[in-house]
Structure formats: C-alpha cells, structure tokens
Amino acid sequence: MSNLEKSWIGTIFSGVFTLAQTREVFQIICLVLTCLSVLLSITSSIISWYRKSSADGKITKEEIKEGAQIINDGVNQIQEVIKNKEEK
C-alpha cells in the first residue's frame, strides 16, 4: 500500500470520526436548548399564575396547589426530555 493510499484511508477515518463527534455535540446542544425552552415555559406559566393568584391581594391554598402542579408538570417535562435523550 502506498503512502498516498494510507493518507486517503486516514483522511476518510478522520472524517467519519469527526462527523460522529459533530453529531454528538449537536445532540447535546439540542438537549440544552430543549431544556431551556421548557424552563422558559415553566417560568412564563409561574409568572402568569402568580399574577392571576395575587390579583385579589391573597393567595389561597388551592392557588398554591395549582402553582405546585405547574412546577411539577414542568419538572416532569424536563425529565422526559432527558430520558428520551438517554434512550437514543
């Protein structure tokens, strides 16, 4: 095998491994962006809940339960995103 053939084989392997690493980096970036979007959604929901709940000057026990449910749903969404990433 000539040096030129060895060089081409090395270049091909290098390209394949770089492509695989790029895909993994892209998947991590997508995971982080998805988690950030879920966090923004949770934050928006909490702010909306707080404004609605405190409009009358007090927050009732039921309203607190509703706020806790919003947070719980958001945490479950993030866990689901991470679980789906781990399965891939």
Image (cartoon, grey):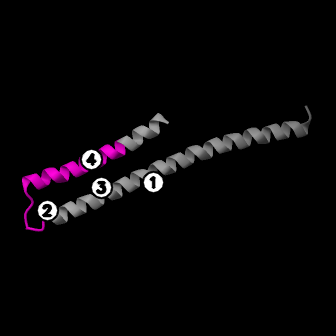
Residue on which disc 1 sits:
33
Q: Are marks 1 and 4 in contact (CB under 8 Å)?
A: no
Kind of residue indicated by mark 1: Leu
Residue on which disc 3 sits:
42
Q: Position of residue 42 (x, y in %)?
A: 30, 55
| SS type, badge 4 | helix
Q: Residue at x 45, y 51 (%)?
A: 32
Mark sitting on residue 75? none
Of the numbered discs 3 and 4, the one sitting upstream in the chain is 3
Of the numbered discs 3 and 1, the one sitting upstream in the chain is 1
Q: Are marks 2 and 1 in contact (CB under 8 Å)?
A: no
Kind of residue indicated by mark 2: Ser
What whole-number distance in Å separates the C-alpha atoms at marks 2 and 4? 18 Å
Which quadrant of the figure has residue 54? Answer: bottom left
Whether the magenta-drawn stretch holds residue 23 is answered as: no
What whole-number distance in Å separates the C-alpha atoms at marks 3 and 4? 9 Å
Q: Which residues are magenta?
A: 54-79
Query: 10 Å neighbourhood of mark 2: few (<14), some, or many (≥20)?
Result: some
| SS type, badge 2 | helix
Label tally: 4
What whole-number distance in Å separates the C-alpha atoms at marks 1 and 4? 18 Å
Residue on which disc 2 sits:
53
Q: Are marks 2 and 4 in contact (CB under 8 Å)?
A: no
What whole-number distance in Å separates the C-alpha atoms at marks 2 and 1? 30 Å
Residue on which disc 4 sits:
73
Q: Residue at x 18, y 66 (%)?
A: 51
What whole-number distance in Å separates the C-alpha atoms at marks 3 and 1? 14 Å
Q: Is residue 25 left or right of residue 64?
A: right
Q: Position of residue 16 (x, y in %)?
A: 70, 40
Whether the magenta-drawn stretch holds residue 57 is answered as: yes
What whole-number distance in Å separates the C-alpha atoms at marks 2 and 3? 16 Å
Judge by depth and name the residue closer to the eye, 10 or 67: 67
